[in-house]
Image (cartoon, rainbow, N blue to C red):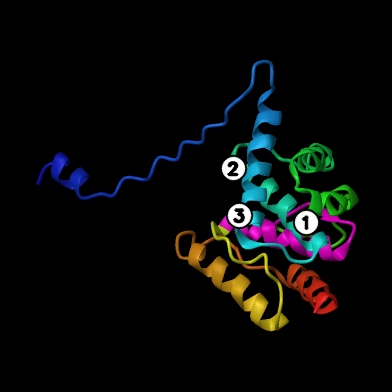
Amino acid sequence: MGWRDINMNRRRPRLDVAVVPMAAGEDRGAAVLRKVVADALASVAEQGGAHAAFTAGYAAGYARHRALKHGLDAEADGGAALRGELAAQAPAKLQDAVRALQFAPRAMPSSRAALAAADETADAGYLVGHLESLCGTRRLLRAGGDVAAYLTRCDHAADRMQTHHPTAVLRFDPAERAIVERALTRLG
């Protein structure tokens, strides 16, 4: 058995290539934000909306994680550029909720985000949007019904990715679960 025989049996990793179209004179960060916000709003449009603050937070979290995949941390400037791009692209029904988004350093440590939305409902959406982008699903925006069942749906979304990344911690940690649970209980 030679080197070629051994190499032919190995599965090669998939090559991921991300294309970010840039307008003339546009910097890379602005182009990435424009693209990831469009992706986040497409996810919102596909799923329909939930509570406006939750949906705005979800779009911000989804876009923030997508930006990380392109090497841009949208939390670095306190989320100002992300909020600005969201406000520029958001549909009319989300405009007020997007303008109301404010971020501050997270009081409880989180593996997902250093910033927290000032409104706890928006913060829950921010965490869920981040998880949804991480897991590559589009089913967690609708937050109606039983809170425990919703958190189980979040765990199931994370578990699918967990099999591909066994050492990563993808589920909500206890502090994040508490934020999502409180917000959904208030919405319920």
**Nearer the observer, 114 or 101:** 101
Is residue 120 inside the magenta stretch? yes
Residue 179 appears left or right of 134: right
Residue corresponding to mark 1: 57
- Residue 87 % position (x, y): 81, 42
Going by the numbered disc 1, the residue's amino acid type is Gly
- Residue 88 % position (x, y): 78, 38
- Identify which residue is drawn at 90% across, 52% down: 100
N-terminal label among 2 and 1: 1
Could you tell me which quadrant the C terminus lies in?
bottom right
Residue corresponding to mark 2: 69
Q: Secondary structure at mark 3?
A: helix
Query: In the image, is residue 76 above or below residue 98?
Result: above
Residue corresponding to mark 3: 133
Magenta segment, principal secondary structure? helix
- Identify which residue is drawn at 80% across, 36% down: 81
Going by the numbered disc 3, the residue's amino acid type is Ser
Disc nearest the viewer among 3 and 2:
3
Residue 178 appears left or right of 112: right
- Identify which residue is drawn at 66% across, 30% down: 31
The magenta-colored residue range is: 112-134
Extreme residue in the front direction = 92
